[in-house]
Image: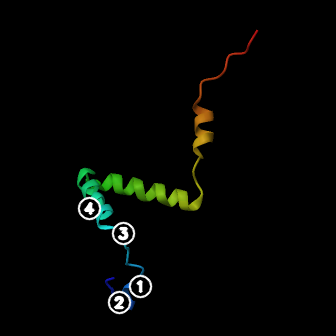
Amino acid sequence: MKMVTIPKDLMKKGDLVVIPRQDYEQLLKRQKVIPVSKLTPSERKALERGRRNIRLGEYIPLDTLVHELAPPRRKKR
């Protein structure tokens, strides 16, 4: 069995992840498939505003939004 020494500074920072090589290679393949694009300044501003609103609790939960946007039900006769 091979032994590995892990530096203590890596353990303290939480920067160490150990996974099987096959899983690591699959992760690298997936990473290449996902397109990455830079945000425009207006998109970045909107994202920051949205994150701030969520942090402050100023948002409408999804189920409430769906309920409010649903068409009105017809009354049965």
Label at residue 56? none
Q: Is residue 55 left or right of residue 72?
A: left
Instruction: Give the residue at mark 1.
Output: 11
Tally of numbered tags: 4
Residue at x 34% of width, y 89% of height: 5
Residue at x 33% of width, y 61% of height: 23
Callout 1: few (<14), some (14-19), or many (20+) C-alpha neighbours within 10 Å?
A: few
Query: Residue 62: x, y in percent?
Result: 57, 43
Instruction: Give the residue at mark 4.
Output: 25
Instruction: Give the residue at mark 2.
Output: 7
Query: Residue 24: x, y in percent?
Result: 30, 64
Cβ atoms at labels 3 and 2 below 8 Å apart:
no
Separation of residues labelled 1 and 3 (CA atoms): 15 Å
Separation of residues labelled 2 and 4 (CA atoms): 24 Å
Of the two numbered discs 3 and 2 on the same chain, state the one appearing first in sequence: 2
Query: Residue 72: x, y in percent?
Result: 64, 23
